Amino acid sequence: MASYRELTENFLQTRSDADFTALFYKVKPGITSYVNKIVKDRELAEDIAINTLTKMWTKIDQYDPQYQITTWLYRIAFNDALGHISNRKKQSSLDKLSEFGVEINESGEFTTGLQGAFEDYELKTEQDFIDEDNELMDKYGRTLKAIDSLKEAYKGIIVDRLINDMKYEEIAEKHNLPLQTIKNRIRRGKAIIEETVS
């Protein structure tokens, strides 16, 4: 299987649709996974990834071949993701950025962490990102199975809390149970799930 650099060199030489497509599908999973960790929205991450890779076609002359193509693409994707989350609630956006080590001053300028926000991802291969996604989906699937196997006394309450994202008070009212009973069952149900999944 051709490497990032080989596919990039092919595209730079030919500028053909075929070589662009090969490079596109090589880097897309990693870009999408990376952006999704920032915006926490898979559909939006897909849109940003496609937008980033469109720029790979339209702005390829701005790329410096002495660097890995992913270094350039992750920077574009990161900046695009920042633009999207800036439209959300300020504190929510800052919380997400802080997870990537990015600090913002009172003037709204990014002061630190821009390189650290994506440098680790430059070292990962496409397969690394695919493996991470597969591991996450596998755990998600096992979690759903664990929830489905819970006793009825726990299952409905756990579904309302973890999947339907209902508040404790709403669950207590729905199931006509004391609030403390709801909290105890959620705590116990989560413990059973963790034991099953781990």
Image (tube, helix red, strand yellow):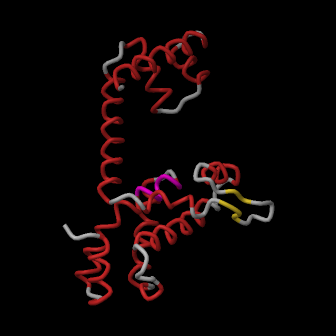
Query: Is 110 located above or below residue 196 in the figure?
Result: below
In the rendered image of this protein, does residue 163 appear above or below residue 113? above
What's the residue at 64%, 61% (across, down)? 86
Q: How far across and how far down the image is residue 161, in percent?
A: 50, 27
Taking the image as shown, residue 20 lies to the left or right of residue 177, namely left
Question: Which one is in front, 127 or 194?
Answer: 127
Q: Position of residue 73 (x, y in %)?
A: 45, 71
- Image-based side of 160 in relation to 109, left or right: left
Q: Quadrant of residue 129?
A: bottom left
Tell me residue 4's x, y (percent).
31, 71
Magenta stretch: helix, strand or loop mostly: helix
Residue at left 46%, top 55%?
A: 36
Which quarter of the rendered picture does the N terminus lie within? Answer: bottom left
Q: Residue at x 40, y 74 (%)?
A: 69
Q: Is residue 139 magenta?
A: no
Residue 122, horizontal then vertical, whole percent: 43, 63
Between residue 45 and residue 136, name the one nearer to us.
136
The residue positioned farthest toward the right in the image shown: 106
User: Going by the image, does 48 lie left or right of 183?
Assistant: left
* Residue range highlighted in magenta: 33-38
Q: Check the image and report above or below for 172 versus 94.
A: above
In the depicted view, which residue is nearer to us: 125 or 149?
125
